[in-house]
Image: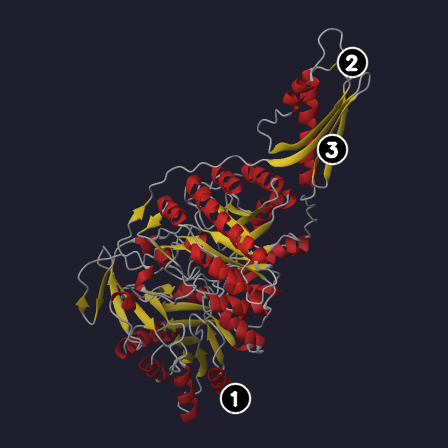
Amino acid sequence: MIELLAPAGSYESFLGAIYAGADAVYAGGEKFGARAYAQNFREEELLAAIDEAHIYGKKLYLTVNTLLKNQEMEKLLYEYLAPFYERGLDGVIVQDLGVLRFIRRNFPGLPLHASTQMTVTGIHSVKLLEEEGASRVVPARELSLKELKAIHRASPLELEVFIHGALCYCYSGQCLFSSILGGRSGNRGRCAQPCRLPYQPSRDGKTYKKSTHLLSPKDLCALKLLPEIIQAGCSSFKIEGRMKQAAYTSGVVSVYRKYLDRYLELERQFQGKPDQEELIKAAYQTEEEDERLLQELFSRGGFNQGYYKQHNGPWMMAFENEKKTTRETFEIRKKQEKIKGNLILFSESPAILEVSFGKNQVTLTDGLVQKAQKQPVTRERILEQMNKLGNTPFCFEEFHLEMDENIFIPMKVLSRMRREALEQLQEQILSSYRRILPVREEHQKLSGNQSVPKTRVSSLPLYASCETREQFAACLKCRELAGIYGPLSCIEEALEKGVHNEKELYLLLPRIVRGEIPTEILSRMEKALEKGAKGFYVSSLEAFGALWERGWSSYCVMDPSLYTWNREAQVFFGEKSVLRDGVPLELNYKELLHRDNHSSELMIYGYLPLMVSAQCVRKNLYRCTREGGRVYMKDRKGKKFPVVCVCDPWQNGENQKCYNVIYNHLPYGLLAEWKQAENLQPASLRMAFTVENQAEVKKVLKDFTDTYKYETEPPARDFTKGHFKRGVE
């Protein structure tokens, strides 16, 4: 299967995509879509679009690719989806694991597509989603052709990949930049795109010569790579652009339709050849005229070919962020499906009209054909009348007319027959897509939207996560800590020397895991467990999937980036027996009071990770040293954000799949709010150390342990409260 999947931010864009040759369209409704500021579709428009897509033999997928709160899951989601499900919606694109479970249970047979917002980076996360009922996965855009091919070989799930349009700088689903700085959450479809603003970089105390758009990638154009992407096992080819105009949608779709069809023709041409794939790649050529059209429709200082063949690099970036659109219109003819018709007009008999489309057929009888008293009706006049199909989605490919000579029938009768026959034909086509909504049983409704009774709990266990040896050493000496999440080498050494003072020790896994966990690392992890390590601190679905397959899910503590905004998502991890999930960072205190936190860990201190990116600020501006380290970037208001270069995620000298983490300029801290934090009744509390030196770690440990353990008056500190007070819309 090869599917060309187009965006539609409006009904006009939807029609443009269908007429230009898209096989499927994805669109957002009035709720829960990742493009809240697109025009989007009202309910009646979306129902009409589902019908229109089906008339043309196309599909429509609905985006429900944001995170949902408990009250939204219970009160809104079911009623929102029900009419679209009944009408025959072809699939739902989902970010939230809780939403995935909810839809699977309440809307049987509705295809579930795991959004790129889930940050699926390998086969283990794919297998998790397959078990949960997903039929398709949209992997992280950062994956290479080699990685996509490996997933395809190991899983039957369809792979949907982006081939054209804007690229996020951050791994989709891992961005808090817009949310924390401006209150507009990308996880709620309201990203303010701070990545498109200029920043002034600095390194080793030296400022780069000028501000530049450090975080602004060029748009993706994979036109030349289509054969290789298809041969990697991908089946749905997605164009980004629900915020763009209809001319952009129809123009881009028409170009990619041309070249996907060209590939299919080459596939037929070389069918049966032993070196078919290489022959296709050699024969496949793109034309400058089409490449120029794509540039005219929209570009941002040119295009890149995405991550299919490269891990990162400055050539992928639009440092000047120069937007250019020179083509405002693109004409596409209305698409009409070809049908067959047969009209029988015999004197003194009813008129008979038959119309058919594929397996669908309608027969109508109406009126009485009379002998002409004066002027008989001509064959030409009848054919002219029957071919007046107006705004219908049909045109006659064949039309047969059997008639006697010297007859008369009013034109209004023929018009009525034509109209009613086409309406019945259309309804017959659409009825095959309709569904009956099952009765929703009361026991399926979730608790969790009611406030959970709270009682004061003193002395909750304190944990700390550390990323450096110096931080780990400081935490080891803090007797108030119940446990530490730290690098594998630090855990091994502490266990070997027996210096952990009965603290629980957990292995801190990389934020992004791609490919298999190295065999040597797995062996060391297993030995650490045997020697007394308690488990793992997990920040990615891929890492969790790998541990789950090994039977280690019950040793896992989950980072807040594995989102559990609602009870359903908590149940997903709870059924896999994780130790603790992470209290969401984008829910406010009042919302958290409505959440069951008894099996959750609350972060009370740390520099919040705003972005995790496969790109590298240091490499793109200076050079790659493969030695880790840190650079800084300053925004227009003078805020200075640390950028940590994670060159060797597994710290085993292999420098595989490096990434950057951009942290907030101020640490998050719930010091003065300690009573509120404890009132949430979490299972534990965590301090996250990332960019702090040892002295800073000691200071934070003292302030927080004094307050949380000994209830001393908290000192004044310059902390951000994140969303603890405000929350997200």
Q: Is residue 288 left or right of residue 452?
A: left
Residue hosting label 1: 530
Element at label 1: helix
Please report whichever mark, 1 or 3, sits nearer to the chain's N-terminal start.
Answer: 3
Judge whether residue 195 can be spotted in this image.
yes
Please report whichever mark, 2 or 3, sits nearer to the chain's N-terminal start.
Answer: 3
Q: Is residue 258 left or right of residue 220?
A: right
Looking at the rendered structure, the number of numbered marks drawn on it comes to 3
Disc 3 residue type?
A: Val
Q: CA distance from mark 2 to mark 3?
A: 24 Å
Label 1 or label 3, whichever lies nearer to me, is 3
- Identify the image quadrant of the N terminus: bottom right
Q: Is residue 208 above or below residue 384?
A: below
Disc 2 residue type?
A: Gln
Q: CA distance from mark 2 to mark 1?
A: 96 Å
Look at 30% across and 52% down and name the residue there: 301
Residue hosting label 2: 370
What number is the disc on residue 362? Answer: 3
